[in-house]
């Protein structure tokens, strides 16, 4: 089953819901109260550098982006430790962010987040770094799973608390 | 592992949470905030909460309500109980409309939390003994300082006390603390060696416009949306007064305010998307963002360092030649008796236009075509003959430029020539750094060299061995003063000499004996007794003899105004200060009252009286006492120019609590017709702030090159680069809070310089390298970012940082007219260190912060 279509991530606050697979295996992460699902979002063997994939996680109202950055990233996975994923809602006021040149950029007030550096705001207004998605790679198949979120998704009181 | 612990859920304030209004503690924008405090074990629900927002649904983009990880903290009150704290950008504030910057967005994280980032606050008065700090009681601290201050005044005179104290609003706690500091130092001690937080003397940075009859805060935020053209002159608005840019200037550029312009302008007057002129040697993020929005309506001018007034005069000359001015306005509202001098010296009417422009081009490095374009965008009448509406905001690039007085005067005059003040969509003044809240007895030096000045240079006094007691309040001059390496070494030497003398034979424990030995040490060593009042242990405080713990934002009631509307609001107290920390007004009142009592015991009535009037019981009383300084404010709207810019006579804390985020704009008048208090939206519509109400023209100096302190580096191959400094979007001032907050220190781990790719190529430097920047004043170590913000031949450095200061490199030159330093220009050499700070580079982004293209 082909889960993801590869395409350039375009500005969109409502990333396509079809990418979200509900009801996957639940995964409880140490140190986190939240009970995140485990969702297959891509495969390290087919992922091309700087060609991001979009997905929704932990639910269909939360657009995210998966990218192979080409250089070692904090919390990156894969053989080069360069595969990372982030929420794509700007943590400043919730506008969509776009991936380009190693960063996520928001054109509402020009916050920019470094994807190799834990999603830190290296320029702009967002006081909260953009949430990084916890990833796991299945070593045999190269399948990549989203299994948690580090940081609060914009517009939520809790990452798993929206109806 | 994430670099630091993140949250994925936040507590919810119940409907009955305590609610306070406040204003951001940081920049001149003064964004409104709401504060919620509630017991840790008593949360509200997604649908019933104090925010009045349905939190069960995914929040919409740009809804105006944000509650992020950085907006929550846990505080402990004096009762020992823990409370949740949420500090939320106020949607109902017309300043920010729910928007916030990376600085203000972390207001909550700065709140004192015994287990949190900011746990290392100063909690007790400290005294240095045997070269270590020991906590003492307030009673002892007050007794020692009062005794010593009095003894020093009695023995050596008032000028033996020197001070460097903040005079601003917001984080420093505005009008209340400033009135107390004024009463203590200006009325009580009466020293003439006074200086203001960032600079060597006690002065205004804008006497060049004030002495023309135009105070620098004369516009309203609305004017940034309504202007045909916004001019940012040495003013990096996007990065340092962020919300003024994103909520007011940016919509204007985007065309979002055209409908409002149509309503506000004269009938038939053209209204279109705004233009912006940015005069800055750097292509910083303000330029990059503006160009990304509307490249064809952005003019970026990059003058050579120090030459801006020549540029302003050349633009004014073009306006003059083209008669893009309103003769009737000039005749009625400006002093035409002084215009001749302006015409001759500034406009250089005796010189042919072509020669003047060629000269200006040679000096400033700015092409004539850009001067022409700037003149058109600033003053060329619109279709139908309507006057253009231009708002010009200048900041550190101008006030901290070479020749402070003439730079400021030239820009003020350029704008008044085009009648760009006192009308909708116009204004000419400071962008501002911090907020304001100044009320003090008259300063010993009323103005520039043209008006009773210039004031004394306290840095030179102290480094030259002058003064016995040096009192530093909420500023860290080891980082922030110009020529800071020399300053630090000089102060340290004197402080250590005093300490060594006291240590020798043991430090007396009894107050009088201690004071006597300190006085003896003054005689024997030329030492300096430094007292520091602050929230944290600072670089400077480490060499103090006594440190007094001060309360901060949210820990005491504060009132201040912002810069872009002079909007007076209350910054309410919502938590207790840590340990024994007190608001500065209370500290100074305790010491002042004790000195008064000591003089009474001596039977010295005159001196006792000098320290009188500080017997306040509450912050509200201090606020009211300060208001008396403004005199009577019963004037009609047409007479507002007669009022002091920050006049708030008749306003009370209770009234401000009721007004909340709405506030009231100073100067506040009591309307003679209605008897009611009334704010002032925009200044100088009817007259200027001079005795006869007319704007006073002034002829600026000609270009005569750089001052000796910098000229010595010209044509010296050891110092091939021009060097300028500025700030980062992320952090506030010396990073006194930000150095503790991971969102900030991971991104900016070290002081840094920006180098142009062309220079970096020649020097063999890459982003992430470490360098030594040096000249004959000193040296600074910095991390390198290679980007095209600077020009080839120009290096930019962050002015100061928790881990070091670039002011080491800045000369001791000050404008002879005002004693304001030229912080922004010198020449340097640069060399690379072998080896890299791997840990720092691992966490810090090295991406270009001035590239916003996809
Ligand atoms: S723009 Fe200034 S006042 Fe507004 S939130 Fe940021 S730092 Fe605070
Ligand atoms: S919403 Fe992204 S920068 Fe403001």
Image (cartoon, helix red, strand yellow):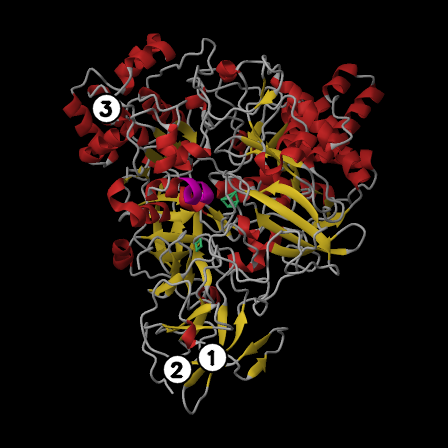
Q: Do residues under tags 2 and 3 come within 8 Å of each other at their CB atoms?
A: no
Question: Dot 2: within a 10 Å radius of its alpha carbon, few (fewer than 14), some, or many (20 or more) residues?
Answer: some
Element class at badge 3: helix
The chain letter for the residue carrying disc 2 is A
Q: Which mark is residue B591?
A: none
Q: Do residues under tags 1 and 2 come within 8 Å of each other at their CB atoms?
A: yes
For the point 54% across and 48% down, the residue is B104
Q: Earlier in the sequence, mark 1 or mark 2?
A: 2
> Whole-percent x and y of residue A25?
54, 84
- The image shows residue B484, relative to residue B429, as above or below, that is below
> Whole-percent x and y of residue B519?
72, 32
Element class at badge 2: loop
Residue position marked by numbered label 1 in the rendering: A21
C-alpha separation, residue under disc 1 versus residue under disc 2? 9 Å
- The image shows residue B593, relative to residue B803, as above or below, that is above
Task: Tell me which secondary structure the magenta stretch mostly adopts.
Answer: helix
Disc tally is 3
For the point 24% across and 18% down, the residue is B348
Q: Which residues are magenta?
A: B242-248
For the point 34% across and 24% down, the residue is B266
Q: Quadrant of ligand 2?
A: bottom left
- Let me know if marks 1 and 2 both belong to one chain: yes
Picture quadrant of residue B340: top left
For the point 74% across and 28% down, the residue is B592
**Viewer-proximal residue among B307 and A33:** A33
Q: Does residue B765 appear to the left or right of A77 in the view shown?
A: left
Picture quadrant of residue B670: top right
Image quarter in which the C terminus of chain B is found: bottom left
Residue position marked by numbered label 3 in the rendering: B384
Residue position marked by numbered label 2 in the rendering: A3
The chain letter for the residue carrying disc 1 is A
- Tell me if residue B281 is in the magenta stretch: no
């Amino acid at each position: 089953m082909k889960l993801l279509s590869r395409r350039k991530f375009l500005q969109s606050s409502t990333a396509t819901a079809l990418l979200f697979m509900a009801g996957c295996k639940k995964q409880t992460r140490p140190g986190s109260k939240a009970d995140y699902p485990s969702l297959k979002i891509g495969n390290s063997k087919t992922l091309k550098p700087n060609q991001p994939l979009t997905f929704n996680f932990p639910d269909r109202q939360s657009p995210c982006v998966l990218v192979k950055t080409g250089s070692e990233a904090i919390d990156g996975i894969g053989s080069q430790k360069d595969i990372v994923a982030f929420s794509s809602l700007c943590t400043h006021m919730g506008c969509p962010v776009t991936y380009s040149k190693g960063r996520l950029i928001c054109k509402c007030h020009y916050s920019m987040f470094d994807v190799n550096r834990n999603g830190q705001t290296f320029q702009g207004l967002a006081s909260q770094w953009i949430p990084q998605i916890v990833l796991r790679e299945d070593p045999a198949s190269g399948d990549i799973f989203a299994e948690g979120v580090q940081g609060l998704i914009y517009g939520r009181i809790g990452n798993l608390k929206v109806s | 592992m994430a670099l630091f612990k993140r949250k994925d859920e936040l507590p919810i304030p119940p409907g009955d949470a305590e609610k306070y209004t406040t204003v951001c503690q940081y920049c001149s924008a003064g964004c409104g905030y709401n504060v919620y405090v509630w017991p840790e074990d008593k949360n509200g629900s997604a649908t019933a909460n104090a925010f009045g927002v349905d939190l069960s649904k995914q929040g919409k983009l740009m809804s105006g309500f944000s509650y992020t990880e950085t907006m929550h903290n846990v505080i402990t009150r004096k009762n020992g109980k823990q409370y949740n704290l949420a500090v939320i950008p106020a949607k109902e504030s017309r300043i920010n409309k729910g928007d916030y910057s990376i600085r203000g967005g972390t207001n909550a994280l700065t709140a004192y939390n015994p287990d949190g980032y900011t746990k290392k606050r100063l909690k007790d008065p400290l005294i240095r003994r045997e070269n270590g700090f020991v906590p003492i009681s307030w009673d002892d601290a007050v007794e020692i300082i009062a005794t010593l201050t009095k003894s020093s005044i009695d023995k050596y005179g008032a000028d033996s006390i020197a001070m460097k104290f903040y005079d601003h609003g917001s984080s420093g706690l505005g009008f209340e603390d400033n009135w107390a500091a004024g009463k203590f130092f200006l009325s009580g001690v009466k020293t003439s060696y006074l200086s203001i937080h960032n600079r060597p003397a006690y002065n205004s940075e804008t006497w060049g416009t004030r002495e023309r009859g135009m105070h620098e805060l004369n516009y309203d935020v609305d004017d940034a949306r309504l202007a045909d053209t916004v001019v940012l002159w040495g003013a990096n608005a996007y990065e340092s007064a962020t919300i003024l840019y994103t909520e007011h200037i940016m919509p204007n550029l985007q065309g979002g305010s055209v409908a409002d312009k149509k309503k506000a302008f004269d009938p038939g007057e053209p209204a279109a998307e705004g233009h912006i002129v940015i005069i800055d040697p750097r292509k910083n993020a303000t330029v990059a963002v503006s160009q990304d929005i509307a490249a064809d309506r952005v003019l970026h001018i990059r003058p050579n360092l120090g030459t801006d007034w020549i540029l302003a005069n050349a633009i004014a000359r073009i306006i003059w030649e083209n008669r893009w001015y309103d003769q009737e306005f000039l005749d009625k509202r400006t002093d035409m008796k002084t215009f001749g001098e302006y015409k001759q010296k500034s406009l250089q009417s005796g010189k042919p236009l072509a020669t003047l422009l060629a000269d200006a081009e040679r000096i400033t490095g700015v092409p004539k075509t850009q001067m022409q374009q700037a003149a058109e965008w600033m003053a060329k009448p619109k279709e139908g003959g309507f006057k253009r509406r231009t708002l010009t905001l200048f900041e550190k690039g101008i006030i901290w430029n070479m020749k402070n007085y003439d730079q400021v005067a030239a820009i003020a005059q350029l704008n008044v020539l085009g009648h760009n003040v006192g009308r909708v969509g116009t204004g000419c003044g400071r962008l501002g750094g911090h907020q304001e809240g100044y009320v003090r007895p008259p300063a010993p030096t009323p103005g520039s060299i043209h008006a009773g000045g210039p004031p004394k240079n306290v840095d030179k006094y102290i480094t030259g061995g002058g003064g016995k007691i040096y009192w530093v309040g909420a500023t860290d001059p080891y980082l922030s003063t110009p020529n800071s390496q020399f300053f630090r070494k000089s102060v340290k030497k004197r402080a250590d000499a005093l300490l060594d003398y006291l240590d020798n034979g043991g430090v007396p424990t009894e107050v009088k004996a201690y004071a006597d030995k300190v006085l003896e040490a003054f005689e024997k060593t030329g030492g300096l007794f430094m007292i520091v009042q602050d929230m944290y242990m600072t670089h400077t405080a480490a060499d103090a003899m006594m440190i007094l713990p001060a309360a901060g934002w949210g820990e005491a009631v504060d009132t201040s105004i912002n810069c872009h509307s002079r909007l007076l609001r209350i910054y309410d107290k919502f938590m207790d200060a840590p340990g024994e920390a007190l608001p500065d007004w209370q500290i100074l009142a305790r010491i002042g009252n004790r000195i008064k009592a000591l003089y009474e015991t001596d039977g010295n009535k005159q001196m006792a009286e000098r320290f009188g009037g500080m017997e306040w019981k509450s912050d509200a009383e201090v606020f009211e006492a300060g208001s008396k300084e403004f005199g009577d404010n019963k004037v009609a709207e047409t007479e507002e120019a007669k009022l002091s810019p920050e006049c708030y006579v008749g306003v009370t804390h209770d009234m401000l609590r009721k007004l909340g985020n709405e506030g009231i704009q100073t100067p506040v008048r009591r309307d003679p017709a209605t008897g009611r208090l009334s704010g002032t939206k925009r200044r100088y519509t009817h007259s200027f702030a001079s005795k006869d109400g007319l704007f006073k023209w002034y002829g600026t100096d000609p270009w005569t090159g750089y001052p000796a302190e910098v000229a010595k580096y010209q044509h010296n191959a050891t110092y091939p680069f021009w060097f300028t400094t500025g700030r980062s979007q992320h952090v506030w001032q010396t990073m006194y809070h930000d150095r503790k907050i991971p969102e900030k220190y991971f991104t900016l781990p070290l002081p840094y310089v920006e180098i142009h790719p062309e220079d970096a190529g020649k020097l063999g430097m890459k982003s992430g390298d470490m360098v030594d920047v040096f000249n004959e004043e000193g040296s600074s170590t910095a991390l390198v970012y290679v980007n095209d913000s600077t020009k080839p031949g120009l290096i930019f450095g962050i002015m100061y940082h928790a881990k070091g200061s670039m002011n080491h490199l800045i000369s001791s030159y000050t404008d002879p007219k005002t004693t304001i330093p030229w912080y922004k220009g010198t020449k340097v050499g640069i060399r690379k260190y072998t080896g890299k700070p791997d840990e720092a580079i691992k966490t810090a982004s090295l991406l270009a912060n001035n590239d916003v293209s996809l």
